[in-house]
Amino acid sequence: MRIERLTIRNFRVFKDVTVADLPPLAIFVGANGSGKSTLFDVFGFLRDALHDNAHVAVTKRGGFKELRSRDSEGPISIEVKFREDDGPLVTYLLEVDETGGRACVTREVLKYKRGRHGKPWHLLDFTRGAGTAVTNESEYDGAASEMKREEQRLESPDILALKGLGQFEKFKTVSAFRRIIEHWHLSNFHIEDARPSQESAYAEHLSPQGANLPLVTQYLYERHPDVFKRILERMSQRVPGVQKVTAEATVDGRVVLRFQDGAFRDPFIAKYVSDGTIKMFAYLVLLHDPSPHPLLCVEEPENQLYPTLLRELVEEFRDYARRGGQVLTSTHSPDLLNAAALDEVYWIEKRAGFSTIVRAADSEQLRALVEEGDTLGDLWKQGLLGSVNP
Ligand SMILES: Nc1ncnc2c1ncn2[C@@H]1O[C@H](COP(=O)(O)OP(=O)(O)OP(=O)(O)O)[C@@H](O)[C@H]1O
Ligand SMILES: [Mg+2]
């Protein structure tokens, strides 16, 4: 499943922006304050709105005064177009505005087209807590069966119909979209927090900052030995100087990792290996998660990694996306960009207080230069990615 297109209106620095043709791995570059983290937070906003309600999602972000684009009017609006395998292109639209001091869902639509032509089918169409929803279709079937629509009312106008209508649990389209939003994950490693010396507890997934790395290591070691073995093998392939990584359970149930450096007889334990080594290990644990996130956003993965490792990391991102999880990442690193393909790169450019997002593949000049063998990081350094400079 993949998000193909995203339109954002009145959401902070994005007054009116569309990101088109999103590939399985998309890499965003842009100056400080151009909106990279804001772009990822659009999914955080959707998740909060779905999990709690629109009011909570807005309030957590400082209320309309902070969240709505400055000096701008109209609802905060997010439109996501996504597709599941060979399924139809599905559109989800959410508009949130302020009514009497509270956030209110002024429009929520989920629709798709059956076949290339014809009118889109609205699975749901709601305004301020009331609207119509289909009650009799649970699959994309080409059959001409008439959809049955019913008027429905939600408990409150700040709840999403996506969540509030019980019948949608069996709808394939709806559960596909809910899965993307509910399992969306933001990774922003603070590697000093991930040093293995934590009290025992339990974790299956790596936390956003990576602080539970020792626990997830232990979980994989015990419950997914095949995945764990693959991570250790990748570690020795990806990190020069790390010849072999072994793991050993201690009597108190922790897992001690030993990193064998080719030059020395005795391995180093994880506490004493370099930041970059631990960070690469943390990325491998994140990216080999036995149940991958359908949408993974990664903030500036380059910190602490040696430039040549970034190429390996981009390969790992692509592998992850191939296994079914889309990856969006932000970067300030020309070296990371040097490993990127033309259609994977976007730049975010701020002008007069608001940002636009430009697809590198839409520049004829870049396309020609890449075809001649230039790499995107070098072209970026030469100032050829809009006015965005590293
Ligand atoms: N309501 C708003 N209207 C317009 N701009 C806003 C609004 N709220 C925040 N901003 C601006 O949006 C920008 C947000 O930047 P963001 O944190 O997304 O940037 P970034 O690209 O992640 O930067 P960095 O590289 O430093 O992490 C800031 O410059 C901030 O001033
Ligand atoms: Mg940021």
Image: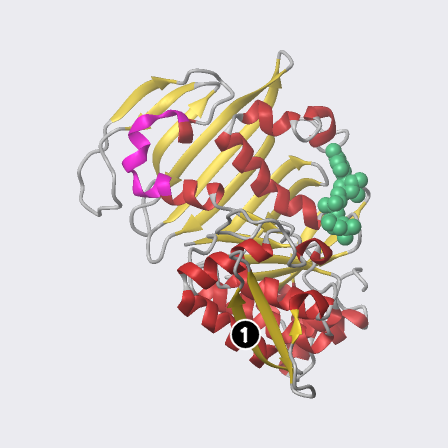
Task: Return the x and y of residue 268 as percentages of the image width and height.
Answer: 67, 74
Q: Which residue occupies 75% across, 75% down?
A: 378
Q: Which residue occupies 51% across, 21% down?
A: 158
Q: Is residue 296 above or below residue 78?
A: below
Main SS category, magenta section: helix
Q: Is residue 225 visible?
A: yes
Q: Is residue 167 above or below residue 188?
A: above
Q: Is residue 179 above or below residue 214?
A: above
Residue neighbourhood size for the residue with mark 1, other residues' Cα within 10 Å, grouped as few (<14), some (14–19), many (≥20): some
Q: Does residue 157 appear to the left or right of 62 in the view shown?
A: left
Q: Which residue occupies 51% across, 27% down?
A: 52
Q: Does residue 67 appear to the left or right of 128 in the view shown?
A: right
Q: Which residue occupies 67% across, 70% down?
A: 277
Task: Return the x and y of residue 129 as percentages of the image width and height.
Answer: 45, 18
Magenta run includes residue 27: no
Task: Return the x and y of residue 131 as percentages of the image width and height.
Answer: 39, 21
Quarter of the picture containing the C terminus is: bottom right
Q: Does residue 12 appear to the left or right of 342 in the view shown?
A: right
Q: Is mark 1 within 8 Å of ligand 2?
A: no
Quarter of the picture containing the N terminus is: bottom left
Q: Secondary structure at mark 1?
A: strand
Q: Is residue 29 above or below residue 117?
A: below
In the image shown, does 164 or 345 lie closer to the viewer?
A: 164
Which contiguous range is marked in magenta?
164-175
Q: Which residue in the structure is indicated by mark 1?
A: 246
Mark 1: amino acid: Thr
